[in-house]
Image (cartoon, helix red, strand yellow):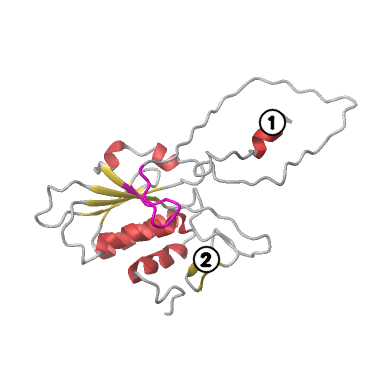
Amino acid sequence: MSKILDGLEPEIVWDIFEKISAIPRCSKKEEGVQEFLEAWARENGVGFNKDEVGNVILIREAAPGCEGYPTLMMQGHQDMVCEKDPESPHDFDVDPIPLKVEGDNVSAEGTTLGADNGIGMAIAMALLVDPSLERHGKLEAVFTVDEESGFTGIRNMSPDFFSGKRMINLDSEELGVIIISSAGGGGTEYSIPISREPPGGWEALSVEVTGLLGGHSGVDIHLPRLNANILQGRI
């Protein structure tokens, strides 16, 4: 059967990416891709384990004579951001991502592509079965769940789920860039008692903040941009 990404190199990377893209995998709905990863591991003789929250580890044992080499972990995540154009009929719960190729660009028709982090997963998986990789220590590919909407995968991962002490993060932003540290995030949950009473003689107003530049709270946090939520709070 003809594939949309036929002819792209490295062939094995794009083949795996296309298979991943055919599986619905919005945050908190990664069961389908977990089943695919388990079947793929079994088919290719790769070690597989899954923890109780759905994090998956794939393992390629060290090559003969390289058992003393340090274990290397490759890290990515299973879920994707599921957004679409208003007019798109796409159903993220059942439909494969509508891939398209235009020149040197791979994108999706009316939806997010899911290369974050599907392509990272595909690269790691390709390395686990690459026959040209002759001398290597133990390789681990760790794919977490719910990275895009809560980090529940990594928050609930046991330290003994993996053994590697060296890690390559395959969830970065740009080609040809090596990241030696990562932006972090923090959150606080709190509750306070409140009492409500109907307002008397008040008029309801709708306040809308528009025209801001937006941005990513990780990679753009250092830029002097306004945050719509903070601005509304000040108003």
Per the rendered image, the range of residues in magenta is 168-180
Residue under the image location 25 percent in, 48 percent down: 72
Callout 2: SS: strand
Where does the image place residue 19, in percent across and percent down from the top left?
Answer: 41, 66
Give the Cα separation between the discs numbered 2 and 1. 37 Å
Is residue 234 placed above or below 152 in the rendered structure? above
Locate the C terminus and report the quarter of the image it occupies: top right
Residue under the image location 32 percent in, 62 percent down: 40
Locate the N terminus and report the quarter of the image it occupies: bottom left
Q: Main secondary structure of the magenta part?
A: loop
**Circle 1 crowding by C-alpha within 10 Å: few under 14, some 14–19, many from 20:** few
Q: State left or right for residue 125 relative to residue 201.
A: left
Q: Which residue is mark 2?
A: 107
Name the residue furthest front: 224
Q: Amino acid at mark 2?
A: Ser
Splitting the image into 4 quarters, where does residue 120 fall? bottom left
Splitting the image into 4 quarters, where does residue 65 fall? bottom left
Q: Earlier in the sequence, mark 2 or mark 1?
A: 2
Residue under the image location 57 percent in, 25 percent down: 190
- Queried whether the magenta region covers residue 172, the answer comes back as yes
Q: State left or right for residue 194 relative to residue 1.
A: right
- Queried whether the magenta region covers residue 206, the answer comes back as no
Which residue is at the front of the view, 45 or 229?
229
Q: Amino acid at mark 1?
A: Gly
Q: State left or right for residue 102 relative to residue 45.
A: right
What label does residue 64 carry, if any? none
Q: Which residue is mark 1?
A: 233
Name the residue furthest bottom: 1
Is residue 144 placed above or below 176 in the rendered structure? above
